[in-house]
């Protein structure tokens, strides 16, 4: 009961007006826009969308007022989170399922930790790091499929179904990923 009162009494979060979205996008540097396209490339896999579609859709939804950018969130982070959401919905629409439980995540050092909600800034940094990690597996389609599934929170049966790999191929792809990541980051990855 106290939680409901606290939520009701919380101040409303201010958002950018729709007429501020265009100038906010135009205000991004050329490098920021290139980063957005690089992040988009990592999010496109499995969506059926083409290059530029996610970014255009994210900006369009903000312009239409369907997505609202909080004033205290960097505009670039808002666009990344919106693209991630659109991509996730597109994958689900393509008959991919999402695990309901929140499984532990593996770090590059092999340690486990429970997943927590990252800040929008962390999402931007993570997306650029993910782009770099995918680059190490361009020659291994099965490994890329596994990485994409992990990025979507898929594990076990859901990961097998999403990747189309049988258990043996899935295990071998995971082994290749872990082996390569240990070689690239012998002391574990730290942001």
Image: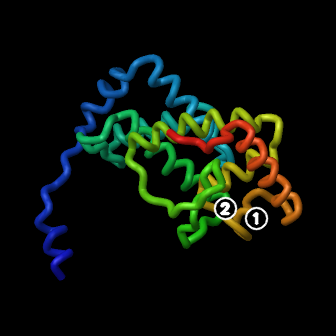
Vertical side of 102 occupied by 88: above or below: above
The residue under the point 61% across, 57% down is 111
Q: Position of residue 186 (x, y in %)?
A: 68, 41
C-alpha gap between disc 1 and disc 2: 8 Å
Q: Position of residue 87 (x, y in %)?
A: 56, 48
Q: Nearer the viewer, residue 97 or 109?
A: 109
CB-based contact (under 8 Å), mark 1 and mark 2: yes
Badge 1 element = helix
Q: Nearer the viewer, residue 158 or 55?
A: 158
Snapshot quadrant of residue 91: bottom right
Q: Nearer the viewer, residue 66 or 79?
A: 79
Which label is found at residue 96?
A: 2
The residue under the point 76% across, 64% down is 161
Snapshot quadrant of residue 149: bottom right
Mark 2: give few (<14), some (14-19) or many (20+) Cα within 10 Å. some
> Which of marks 2 and 1 precedes in the sequence?
2
Select label 1 or label 2 by which is in front: 1
Which label is found at residue 161?
A: 1
Snapshot quadrant of residue 104: bottom right
Q: Which residue of the protein is positioned furthest toward the front in this rendering?
A: 187
Q: Position of residue 37 (x, y in %)?
A: 55, 29
Badge 2 element = loop
């Amino acid at each position: 009961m106290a939680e409901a009162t606290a939520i009701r009494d919380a101040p409303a979060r201010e958002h950018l007006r729709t007429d501020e979205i265009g100038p906010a996008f135009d205000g991004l540097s050329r490098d920021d826009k290139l980063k957005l396209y690089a992040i988009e490339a990592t999010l496109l896999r499995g969506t059926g969308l083409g290059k530029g579609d996610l970014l255009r859709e994210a900006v369009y939804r903000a312009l239409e007022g369907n997505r609202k950018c909080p004033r205290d969130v960097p505009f670039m982070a808002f666009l990344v989170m919106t693209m991630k959401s659109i991509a996730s919905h597109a994958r689900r629409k393509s008959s991919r399922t999402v695990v309901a439980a929140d499984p532990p995540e593996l770090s590059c050092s092999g340690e486990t930790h429970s997943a927590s909600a990252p800040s929008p800034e962390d999402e931007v940094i993570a997306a650029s790091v993910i782009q770099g990690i995918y680059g190490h597996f361009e020659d291994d389609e099965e490994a890329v499929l596994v990485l994409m599934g992990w990025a979507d929170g898929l594990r076990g049966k859901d990961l097998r179904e999403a990747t189309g790999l049988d258990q043996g191929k899935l295990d071998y792809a995971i082994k290749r990923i872990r082996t390569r990541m240990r070689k690239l980051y012998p002391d574990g990855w730290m942001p």
